[in-house]
Amino acid sequence: MKIRFIKTDERAQAPKYGTEFSAGADICALDEVTLSPGQTVLIHTGIAVEIPDGYAGFIYARSGMATKRGLAPANKVGVIDSDYRGEIMVAMYNQSSENRTVMAGERVAQMVIAPYIKAEFDECETLDETLRGSGGFGSTGRS
C-alpha cells in the first residue's frame, strides 16, 4: 500500500520504518522542544498524510522513549482519520520528574496504518448473556 504525504515544512522527514518487519513508521519532531515534568506539548512533524478510506493512522509511543525518558503521547494513541489532511502533531507528555528535551529530527512516535470497521449502532432493550456478564476491571482474575 502506498501512502501519499506532503511536507508542510521543508525540514520535515518522511515517515520511515526502522526495520523490514516494523509495524509502525517512525515520525520525527520538526523542532527542538523541552518539556517540564507533567507538561504536555504539541510536537510538530511537518508532514500531512493521505490515508485511504477504510483505514486510519494510529500514533503510538516509541517504547524506548516512553520507558527510558518518560515521554509518550498524552492521549496514549492518536487517531488520524482518512479525511484529515492537516499536519500530524504529537501531543507529547513528560511523565518523568525531570525536564526532557526532544531534539529536532528525533523520532518521537510511530504511525501504524490499519483498517477499521465502521459500525452501525443499533439501540435495543437487552444484550445477549455471557459468562462474564458485566464484570469488569479485574473481574476475570488478578491483573
Image (cartoon, rainbow, N blue to C red):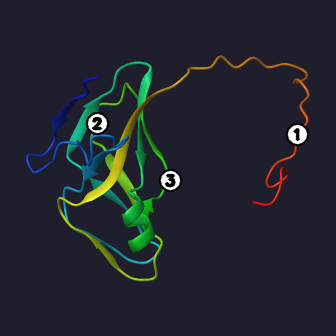
Q: Amino acid at mark 2?
A: Gly
Which residue, given by chain and number where applicable, does mark 1 sit on?
132
Secondary structure at badge 1 equals loop
The residue lying toward the viewer, choosing from 54 and 30, is 54
Query: Residue drawn 19% across and 56% down?
Result: 30
Query: Residue drawn 35% across and 80% down?
Result: 99
The Cα–Cα distance between marks 1 and 3, rounded to whole angstroms, is 27 Å
Which residue, given by chain and number where applicable, does mark 2 sit on?
86
Secondary structure at badge 3 equals loop
The Cα–Cα distance between marks 2 and 3, rounded to whole angstroms, is 20 Å
Tell me where residue 142 appears, x and y as whole percent: 80, 60
Which residue, given by chain and number where applicable, does mark 3 sit on?
76
Tell me where residue 28 appears, x and y as whole percent: 24, 53
Quarter of the figure that contains the N terminus: top left
Tell me where residue 119 appears, x and y as whole percent: 62, 20
The residue lying toward the viewer, choosing from 94 and 16, is 16
Tell me where residue 46 appears, x and y as whole percent: 20, 46
Q: Amino acid at mark 1?
A: Arg
When asked about the image quadrant of residue 8, the answer is top left
| N-term mark: 2 or 3 | 3
